[in-house]
Amino acid sequence: MTQANSNGSTIRASTVESEPPTIAIKSLNHVYFDYQSKKTVHALKDVELEIQPSELVTVVGPSGCGKTTLLNIIAGFIKPTEGQILVNGRPVNKPGKDRGVVFQELAILPWRTVYRNIAHGLEIQKVAKEEIERRVRRLTELTGLEGFENHYPHQLSGGMKQRVAVARTWAADPEIILMDEPFAAVDAMTRQTLQEELLSLTVRTGKTVFFITHSVEEAVFLGDRVIALSARPGRVKADITVPVSRANRSWREMSKNDALQECVEDVLELVRGEATASDRSGGAVSADRTHEA
């Protein structure tokens, strides 16, 4: 069932595709005890979502709506209270090689060079040296790290460190990339550059990406679809198809494209409404990093 907006974007209640979904979330509920507030928190309720192969799906919503909780459940870090996560039709019960995670906090090793950080997971998997060299060379090219292979993290800017974190996750060649606000800590200009580079990387590698953000503009700029979650307990408030192909986007064009700007307004209105509802109900209960957002 779909509903078209005036700008050509589509808000849809469900996704129907001929190809089996890479990720299927079915009747998902999650409740946990927050030790800081000493309260039981209903983080997610009746979440239904399908993500198709090679899609980049972004997720927005008010603070505390369960975005990070949902990502951690897909990653296999948390077992949901009810419901099911399927990856290519198989239930998710634990972390797996088919899913890679890029966290908001940098997860690179300070004693390893750029090259050896990117190669780290491959070395653990005992991948042949020639294959490691091939993958690292390709990813340094794709992420703008050429010439920095022998640098250590302390010699890099924040944006370059985040490129290393992205490249290291991609190097292991998981089918699915889960990204939890990876560009939140960098300045605005660097963030736009990293966003454009991520679009290029995803188009060229065909990965399926689940991307969490607090920025509505970032969500629309990056996503094939934008999932707006309600205030806690988080539900899928809307599933919005972005009307311009990822392959044809740049920040220069973003400000000039009426369809994209109207899509931003559509999503912003949804998120503002949910944030207002959250404020009226007293706001979200604080939680640890595993469950927050």
Image (spheres, grey):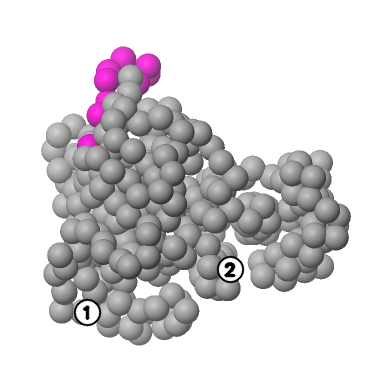
The residue that mark 1 highlights is 8
Secondary structure beneath dot 2 equals helix
Secondary structure mostly seen in the magenta stretch: strand
Q: In the rendered structure, find residue 205 and report the number of the disc placed on it.
A: 2
Foreground mark, 2 or 1, reads: 2
On the rendered structure, is 289 left or right of 274? right
Q: Residue at x 20, y 63 (%)?
A: 12
Mark 2 and mark 1 lie on one chain; the one further toward the N terminus is 1
Spatial CA span between label 2 and label 1: 27 Å
On screen, residue 134 above or below 229:
below
On the rendered structure, is 29 left or right of 177? left
Q: Nearer the viewer, residue 221 or 55?
A: 55
Q: For the residue marked with disc 1, what is the amino acid?
A: Gly
Q: Residue at x 56, y 41 (%)?
A: 96
Position of residue 272 measured from the top left corner of the image (x, y, whole percent): 21, 54
Q: Residue at x 53, y 68 (%)?
A: 206
> What range of the chain is rendered magenta?
34-45
Q: Residue at x 43, y 75 (%)?
A: 246
Q: Is residue 42 magenta?
A: yes
On screen, residue 245 above or below 178:
below
Question: Within 10 angstroms of label 2, few (less than 14), some, or many (20 or more) residues?
Answer: few
